[in-house]
Structure formats: structure tokens, C-alpha cells
Image: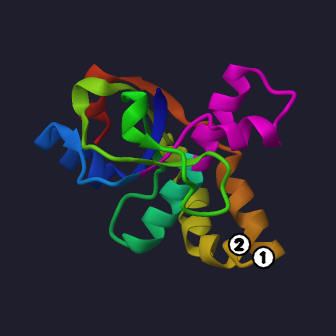
Amino acid sequence: MRVYLPSTLPALADTLKHGEVGPPPLQAFAVTPALREAYASGDDEELEYVAMLAAARQSLRLLASEPDAPRRRVVLAADVPDQQVSWTAYDDEPAAVLVKIPVAIDAVASGHIDAAEAAADVAAAAEAIGAADAGDEDAEFTVDGAEGHELAWYATQELPDAC
């Protein structure tokens, strides 16, 4: 199953150093039955994009807790065995899943990282994400500003250069 793991640039560097994302359980996002129900008209590619965007929003939450991290969202797309994924969501996000095992770097299919020019918007969004989660419309507008930036695609062999 393809899962989308939220991260940050320092966490990505740590993943590359240790050869895995961990320790489990890992908060991730995937095309779940709940996501399919929420987006009844979406095809698989659209649903995977929605799951990746949910992971990118979680990356903002990680950045909010890491004030020294570069202000760029990071999402790792990885393939893990279905039986190692728990469909029990840990929040109200229909794409939320838990991965029960560390994810080896060999299981990572690609990385998705903000370009450097997104840093100012991502920084503002990381500061606003808590208020946006609480329903503040102005904060949500700020978060939307970061989400307006498309994440750049990186092949796994390019990830060390992105750190």
C-alpha cells in the first residue's frame, strides 16, 4: 500500500542517515475507505493527491514543533505491506493511518518537498496551523497560502541533495 509520511528536512536527513523512517507507530496518510467515501467522485490518482496533501498539512504541524527546521514541507511516498497499516484514524482526517513498522528507505518511492521560494509562506503557515486547526478563518487563509505551493517531486537518489 502506498502511504504518505509527513516529515521535515532535518527528519529526512536523519532518515537517510539511519536508513529508515521510525520508530513506529508512524502517522501517515493513504487512500482509505473513509477517504474514498469522502471523495466519491475521485479516481485513485486524485485520492492519492488528497492523501499527500493531508501529509503536507501534517508536515506543517511538525514544522510548528521544530522552530529551527528549514521552512519547507516534506512528504515521503512509501510502499508498505497492507497488513502493517492500521486503518484506525488517529484524528478526523479520513486519510489518516498508522504504520506499525519502521519504513526502510528502500520502500520510499519518492520525496515531495517545497521549493525554497515557498519558505516564507510555509513559515507563516507553520505559525498559523494551530489556530487553523482550531477553526480560525484568518489562520486557515494563511495555511492555504502555503498549500498553494506545489511540492516538487524528488527521486529517492535525489533526496540527499535536498537536505
- Whether residue 66 sits left or right of residue 86 in the image: it is left
Residue at image mark 2: 132
Magenta-colored span: 27-54
Residue at the spot 51% in from the left edge and 48% down from the top edge:
97
For badge 1, the amino acid type reads Gly
* Residue 36 on the magenta span: yes
For label 2, the crowd category at 10 Å Cα-Cα, with few meaning under 14, some 14 to 19 and many 20 or more, is some
Q: Observer-nearest residue: 132 or 22?
A: 22
Q: Secondary structure at mark 1?
A: loop
Residue at the spot 74% in from the left edge and 34% down from the top edge:
36
Which disc number belongs to residue 31? none
Find residue 10 and report its horizontal and vertical position in percent: 27, 54
Quadrant for the C terminus, please: top left
State how the image is colored. rainbow
Q: Do the residues bearing badges 1 and 2 touch, measured as CB atoms within 8 Å?
A: yes
Residue at image mark 1: 135
Above or below, comparing residue 59 to residue 32 in the picture: below
* Residue 139 on the magenta span: no
Find residue 29 and report its horizontal and vertical position in percent: 54, 44
- Whether residue 75 sits left or right of residue 47 in the image: it is left
- Whether residue 22 sits left or right of residue 113 in the image: it is left
Residue at the spot 37% in from the left edge and 29% down from the top edge:
80
Q: Secondary structure at mark 2?
A: helix
Quarter holding residue 39: top right
Q: Observer-nearest residue: 138 or 5?
A: 5
Residue at the spot 76% in from the left edge and 67% down from the top edge:
140
For badge 2, the amino acid type reads Ala
